[in-house]
Image (tube, grey):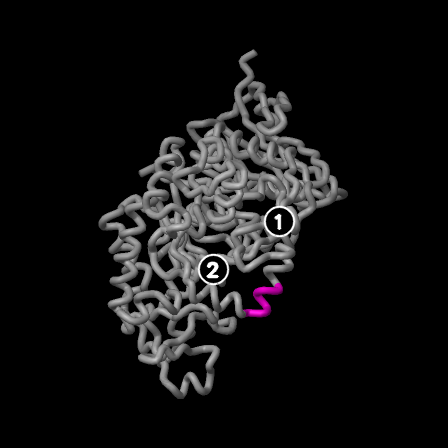
């Protein structure tokens, strides 16, 4: 088992797509055990602490059939990959039949080989868990009807899209409260004691083969959310929260196992309190993409310890590609911001090279797209330099950016600093298409009167500034549109 740092950098990889493309490169079918070492090196550049192999579990044949018969899905598939064939449609990785590694990927032996390759690089392994639902052909459906939200024949007649009649019982189809039911999954009952025990057992098994799990739509299992979604069908909520009970049980056998939650609706704090190490920071994602620097800054005023348990990202398999949604300069500025904030960070395979097509997770083939070598070099330098500096092992603080009465451009800047055993670091990001100036005063009272050398970790520029200036008026910064500074401060002994 690889021990992950307190704020890990995670690289998400679509396993089936990646293996298929690896096989095309090697000229032979490739499972997880046959991936060449240089290909492992490509997805574990310096600064990456863990790889999330998305979609390793056995997908549902019945779920795949449902997808093949869905005209809206088929249209979306063809829009993403023109000419896509049925052989390219693997089914949803979140319509899981069993938590066993798909034989097409190399089975459990292949996963063990993959984990060993990652471990040799000091990189951890994350996998998925889907707590809200299972495929309609999951063995649980016939063997454990007590695990599910139930219905009756009248429900099927009234709402055939919302309920599944298996011939032996009627079950609700999986859903969240704001959208129609998903047609390819069956709803688990988060209030059922037997389901909670079964969930802990499955997660215990997953914990034996990886270092952590990303729990899909984790907020749906919060007692209050689940009660409002299903009402009288599931009865009164238990005294203990679903996740508090399950995570506590799993950690008895796996005390170091990482739990990361896909979370929305501002429920991150609740999930952290219920045992999750990390929760998606979707609110920051939305603000960076669609709002102004002051909005981003207000988000970053939250308590540092809370922020350390968030997952910062600019894309993942559920969101559009960053290269599609952001202009190139803004994409780089946003990446610098994300990489230097507290919390875990999530990067999506293809993000570094500028892929623009958002691939439906049902597919195991994607279109060819030209790689952007400069963008890849930028991301790899960013992750490597931030990691090598050790800045994120210290304490973090958001800083004020002071302007002048006749110049309010400072409002476009986000400044923060890290201080700790690895040294002192100052980041300033211009989150606007306008030139911006400000004075930024770091909280380093120990600087004294001597001259300090500020080295930009990304550009290797060097600036000499006196401690008196930094502590007095503050560091003067003048950044072009979407410009950045990532500065390391060291006493000038020359």
Residue 309 among those drawn in magenta: no
Please indicate whether residue 144 sits to the left or right of residue 474 in the image: left
Task: Tell me which corner region of the image, top left, top right, bottom left or bottom right, holds residue 481.
Answer: top right
Up the image or down, 458 lies above or below 481; here it is above
Using the numbered discs, state the Cα–Cα distance from disc 1 to disc 2 in whole angstroms.
18 Å
Task: Tell me which corner region of the image, top left, top right, bottom left or bottom right, holds residue 377.
Answer: top right
Task: Tell me which corner region of the image, top left, top right, bottom left or bottom right, holds residue 333.
Answer: top right
Residue shown at the point (41%, 42%) measured from the top left: 32
Assign the magenta stretch its main secondary structure.
helix
Residue shown at the point (34%, 59%) measured from the top left: 98
Classify 10 Å Cα crowding around label 1: few (below 14), some (14-19), many (20 and above). few
- SS at circle 2: loop
Q: Which residue is mark 2?
A: 92
Residue shown at the point (58%, 50%) measured from the top left: 366
Front position in the image: 479 or 88: 88
x and y, in percent, of residue 409 in the image: 71, 43
Q: Which residue is mark 1?
A: 367
Front position in the image: 454 or 48: 48
Residue shown at the point (31%, 38%) measured from the top left: 1
Residue lying at the far front of the rendered structure? 28
Up the image or down, 23 lies above or below 364; here it is above
x and y, in percent, of residue 37 in the image: 44, 31
Classify 10 Å Cα crowding around label 2: few (below 14), some (14-19), many (20 and above). many
Part of the protein shown in magenta: 70-75
x and y, in percent, of residue 326 in the image: 66, 48
């Amino acid at each position: 088992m690889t021990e992950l740092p307190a704020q890990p950098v995670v690289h998400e990889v679509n396993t089936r797509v990646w293996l298929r493309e690896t096989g095309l490169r090697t000229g032979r079918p490739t499972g997880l055990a046959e991936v060449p070492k240089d290909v492992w090196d490509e997805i574990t550049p310096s600064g990456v602490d863990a790889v999330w192999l998305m979609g390793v579990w056995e997908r549902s044949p019945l779920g795949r059939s449902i997808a093949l018969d869905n005209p809206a899905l088929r249209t979306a598939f063809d829009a993403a990959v023109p000419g896509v064939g049925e052989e390219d449609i693997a089914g949803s990785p979140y319509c899981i039949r069993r938590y066993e590694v798909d034989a097409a990927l190399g089975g459990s032996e292949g996963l063990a080989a993959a984990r060993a390759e990652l471990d040799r690089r000091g990189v951890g392994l994350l996998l998925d868990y889907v707590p809200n639902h299972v495929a309609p052909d999951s063995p649980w459906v016939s063997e454990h009807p007590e695990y599910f939200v139930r219905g009756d024949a009248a429900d099927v007649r009234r709402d055939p899209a919302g309920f599944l009649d298996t011939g032996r019982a009627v079950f609700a189809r999986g859903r969240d409260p704001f959208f129609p039911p998903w047609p390819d999954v069956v709803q688990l009952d988060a209030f059922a004691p037997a389901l909670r025990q079964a969930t802990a057992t499955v997660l215990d098994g997953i914990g034996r083969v990886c270092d952590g799990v990303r729990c899909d739509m984790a907020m749906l299992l919060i007692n209050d959310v689940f009660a409002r979604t299903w009402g009288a069908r599931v009865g009164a909520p238990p005294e203990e929260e679903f996740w508090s009970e399950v995570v506590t049980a799993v950690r008895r056998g796996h005390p170091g196992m990482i739990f990361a939650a896909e979370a929305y609706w501002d429920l991150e704090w609740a999930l952290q309190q219920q045992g999750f190490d990390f929760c998606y920071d979707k609110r920051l994602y939305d603000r960076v993409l669609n709002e102004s620097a002051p909005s981003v800054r207000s988000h970053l005023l939250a308590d540092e310890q809370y922020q350390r348990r968030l997952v910062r990202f600019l894309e993942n398999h559920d969101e559009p590609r960053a290269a599609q949604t952001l202009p190139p300069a803004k994409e780089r500025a946003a990446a610098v911001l994300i990489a230097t904030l507290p919390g875990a960070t999530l990067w999506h395979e293809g993000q570094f090279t500028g892929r623009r097509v958002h691939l439906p997770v049902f597919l195991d083939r994607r279109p060819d797209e030209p790689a952007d070598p400069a963008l890849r070099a930028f991301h790899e330098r960013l992750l490597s330099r931030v990691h090598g500096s050790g800045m994120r092992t210290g304490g973090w603080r958001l800083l004020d950016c002071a302007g002048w009465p006749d110049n309010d451009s400072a409002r476009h800047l986000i400044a923060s600093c890290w201080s700790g055993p690895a040294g002192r670091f100052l980041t300033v990001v211009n989150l606007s298409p306008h030139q911006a100036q400000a004075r930024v005063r770091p909280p380093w009272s120990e600087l004294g009167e001597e001259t300090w050398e500020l080295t930009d970790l990304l550009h290797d520029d060097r600036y000499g500034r006196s401690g008196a200036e930094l502590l007095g008026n503050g560091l003067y910064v003048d950044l072009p549109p979407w410009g950045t500074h990532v500065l390391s401060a060291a006493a000038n002994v020359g």
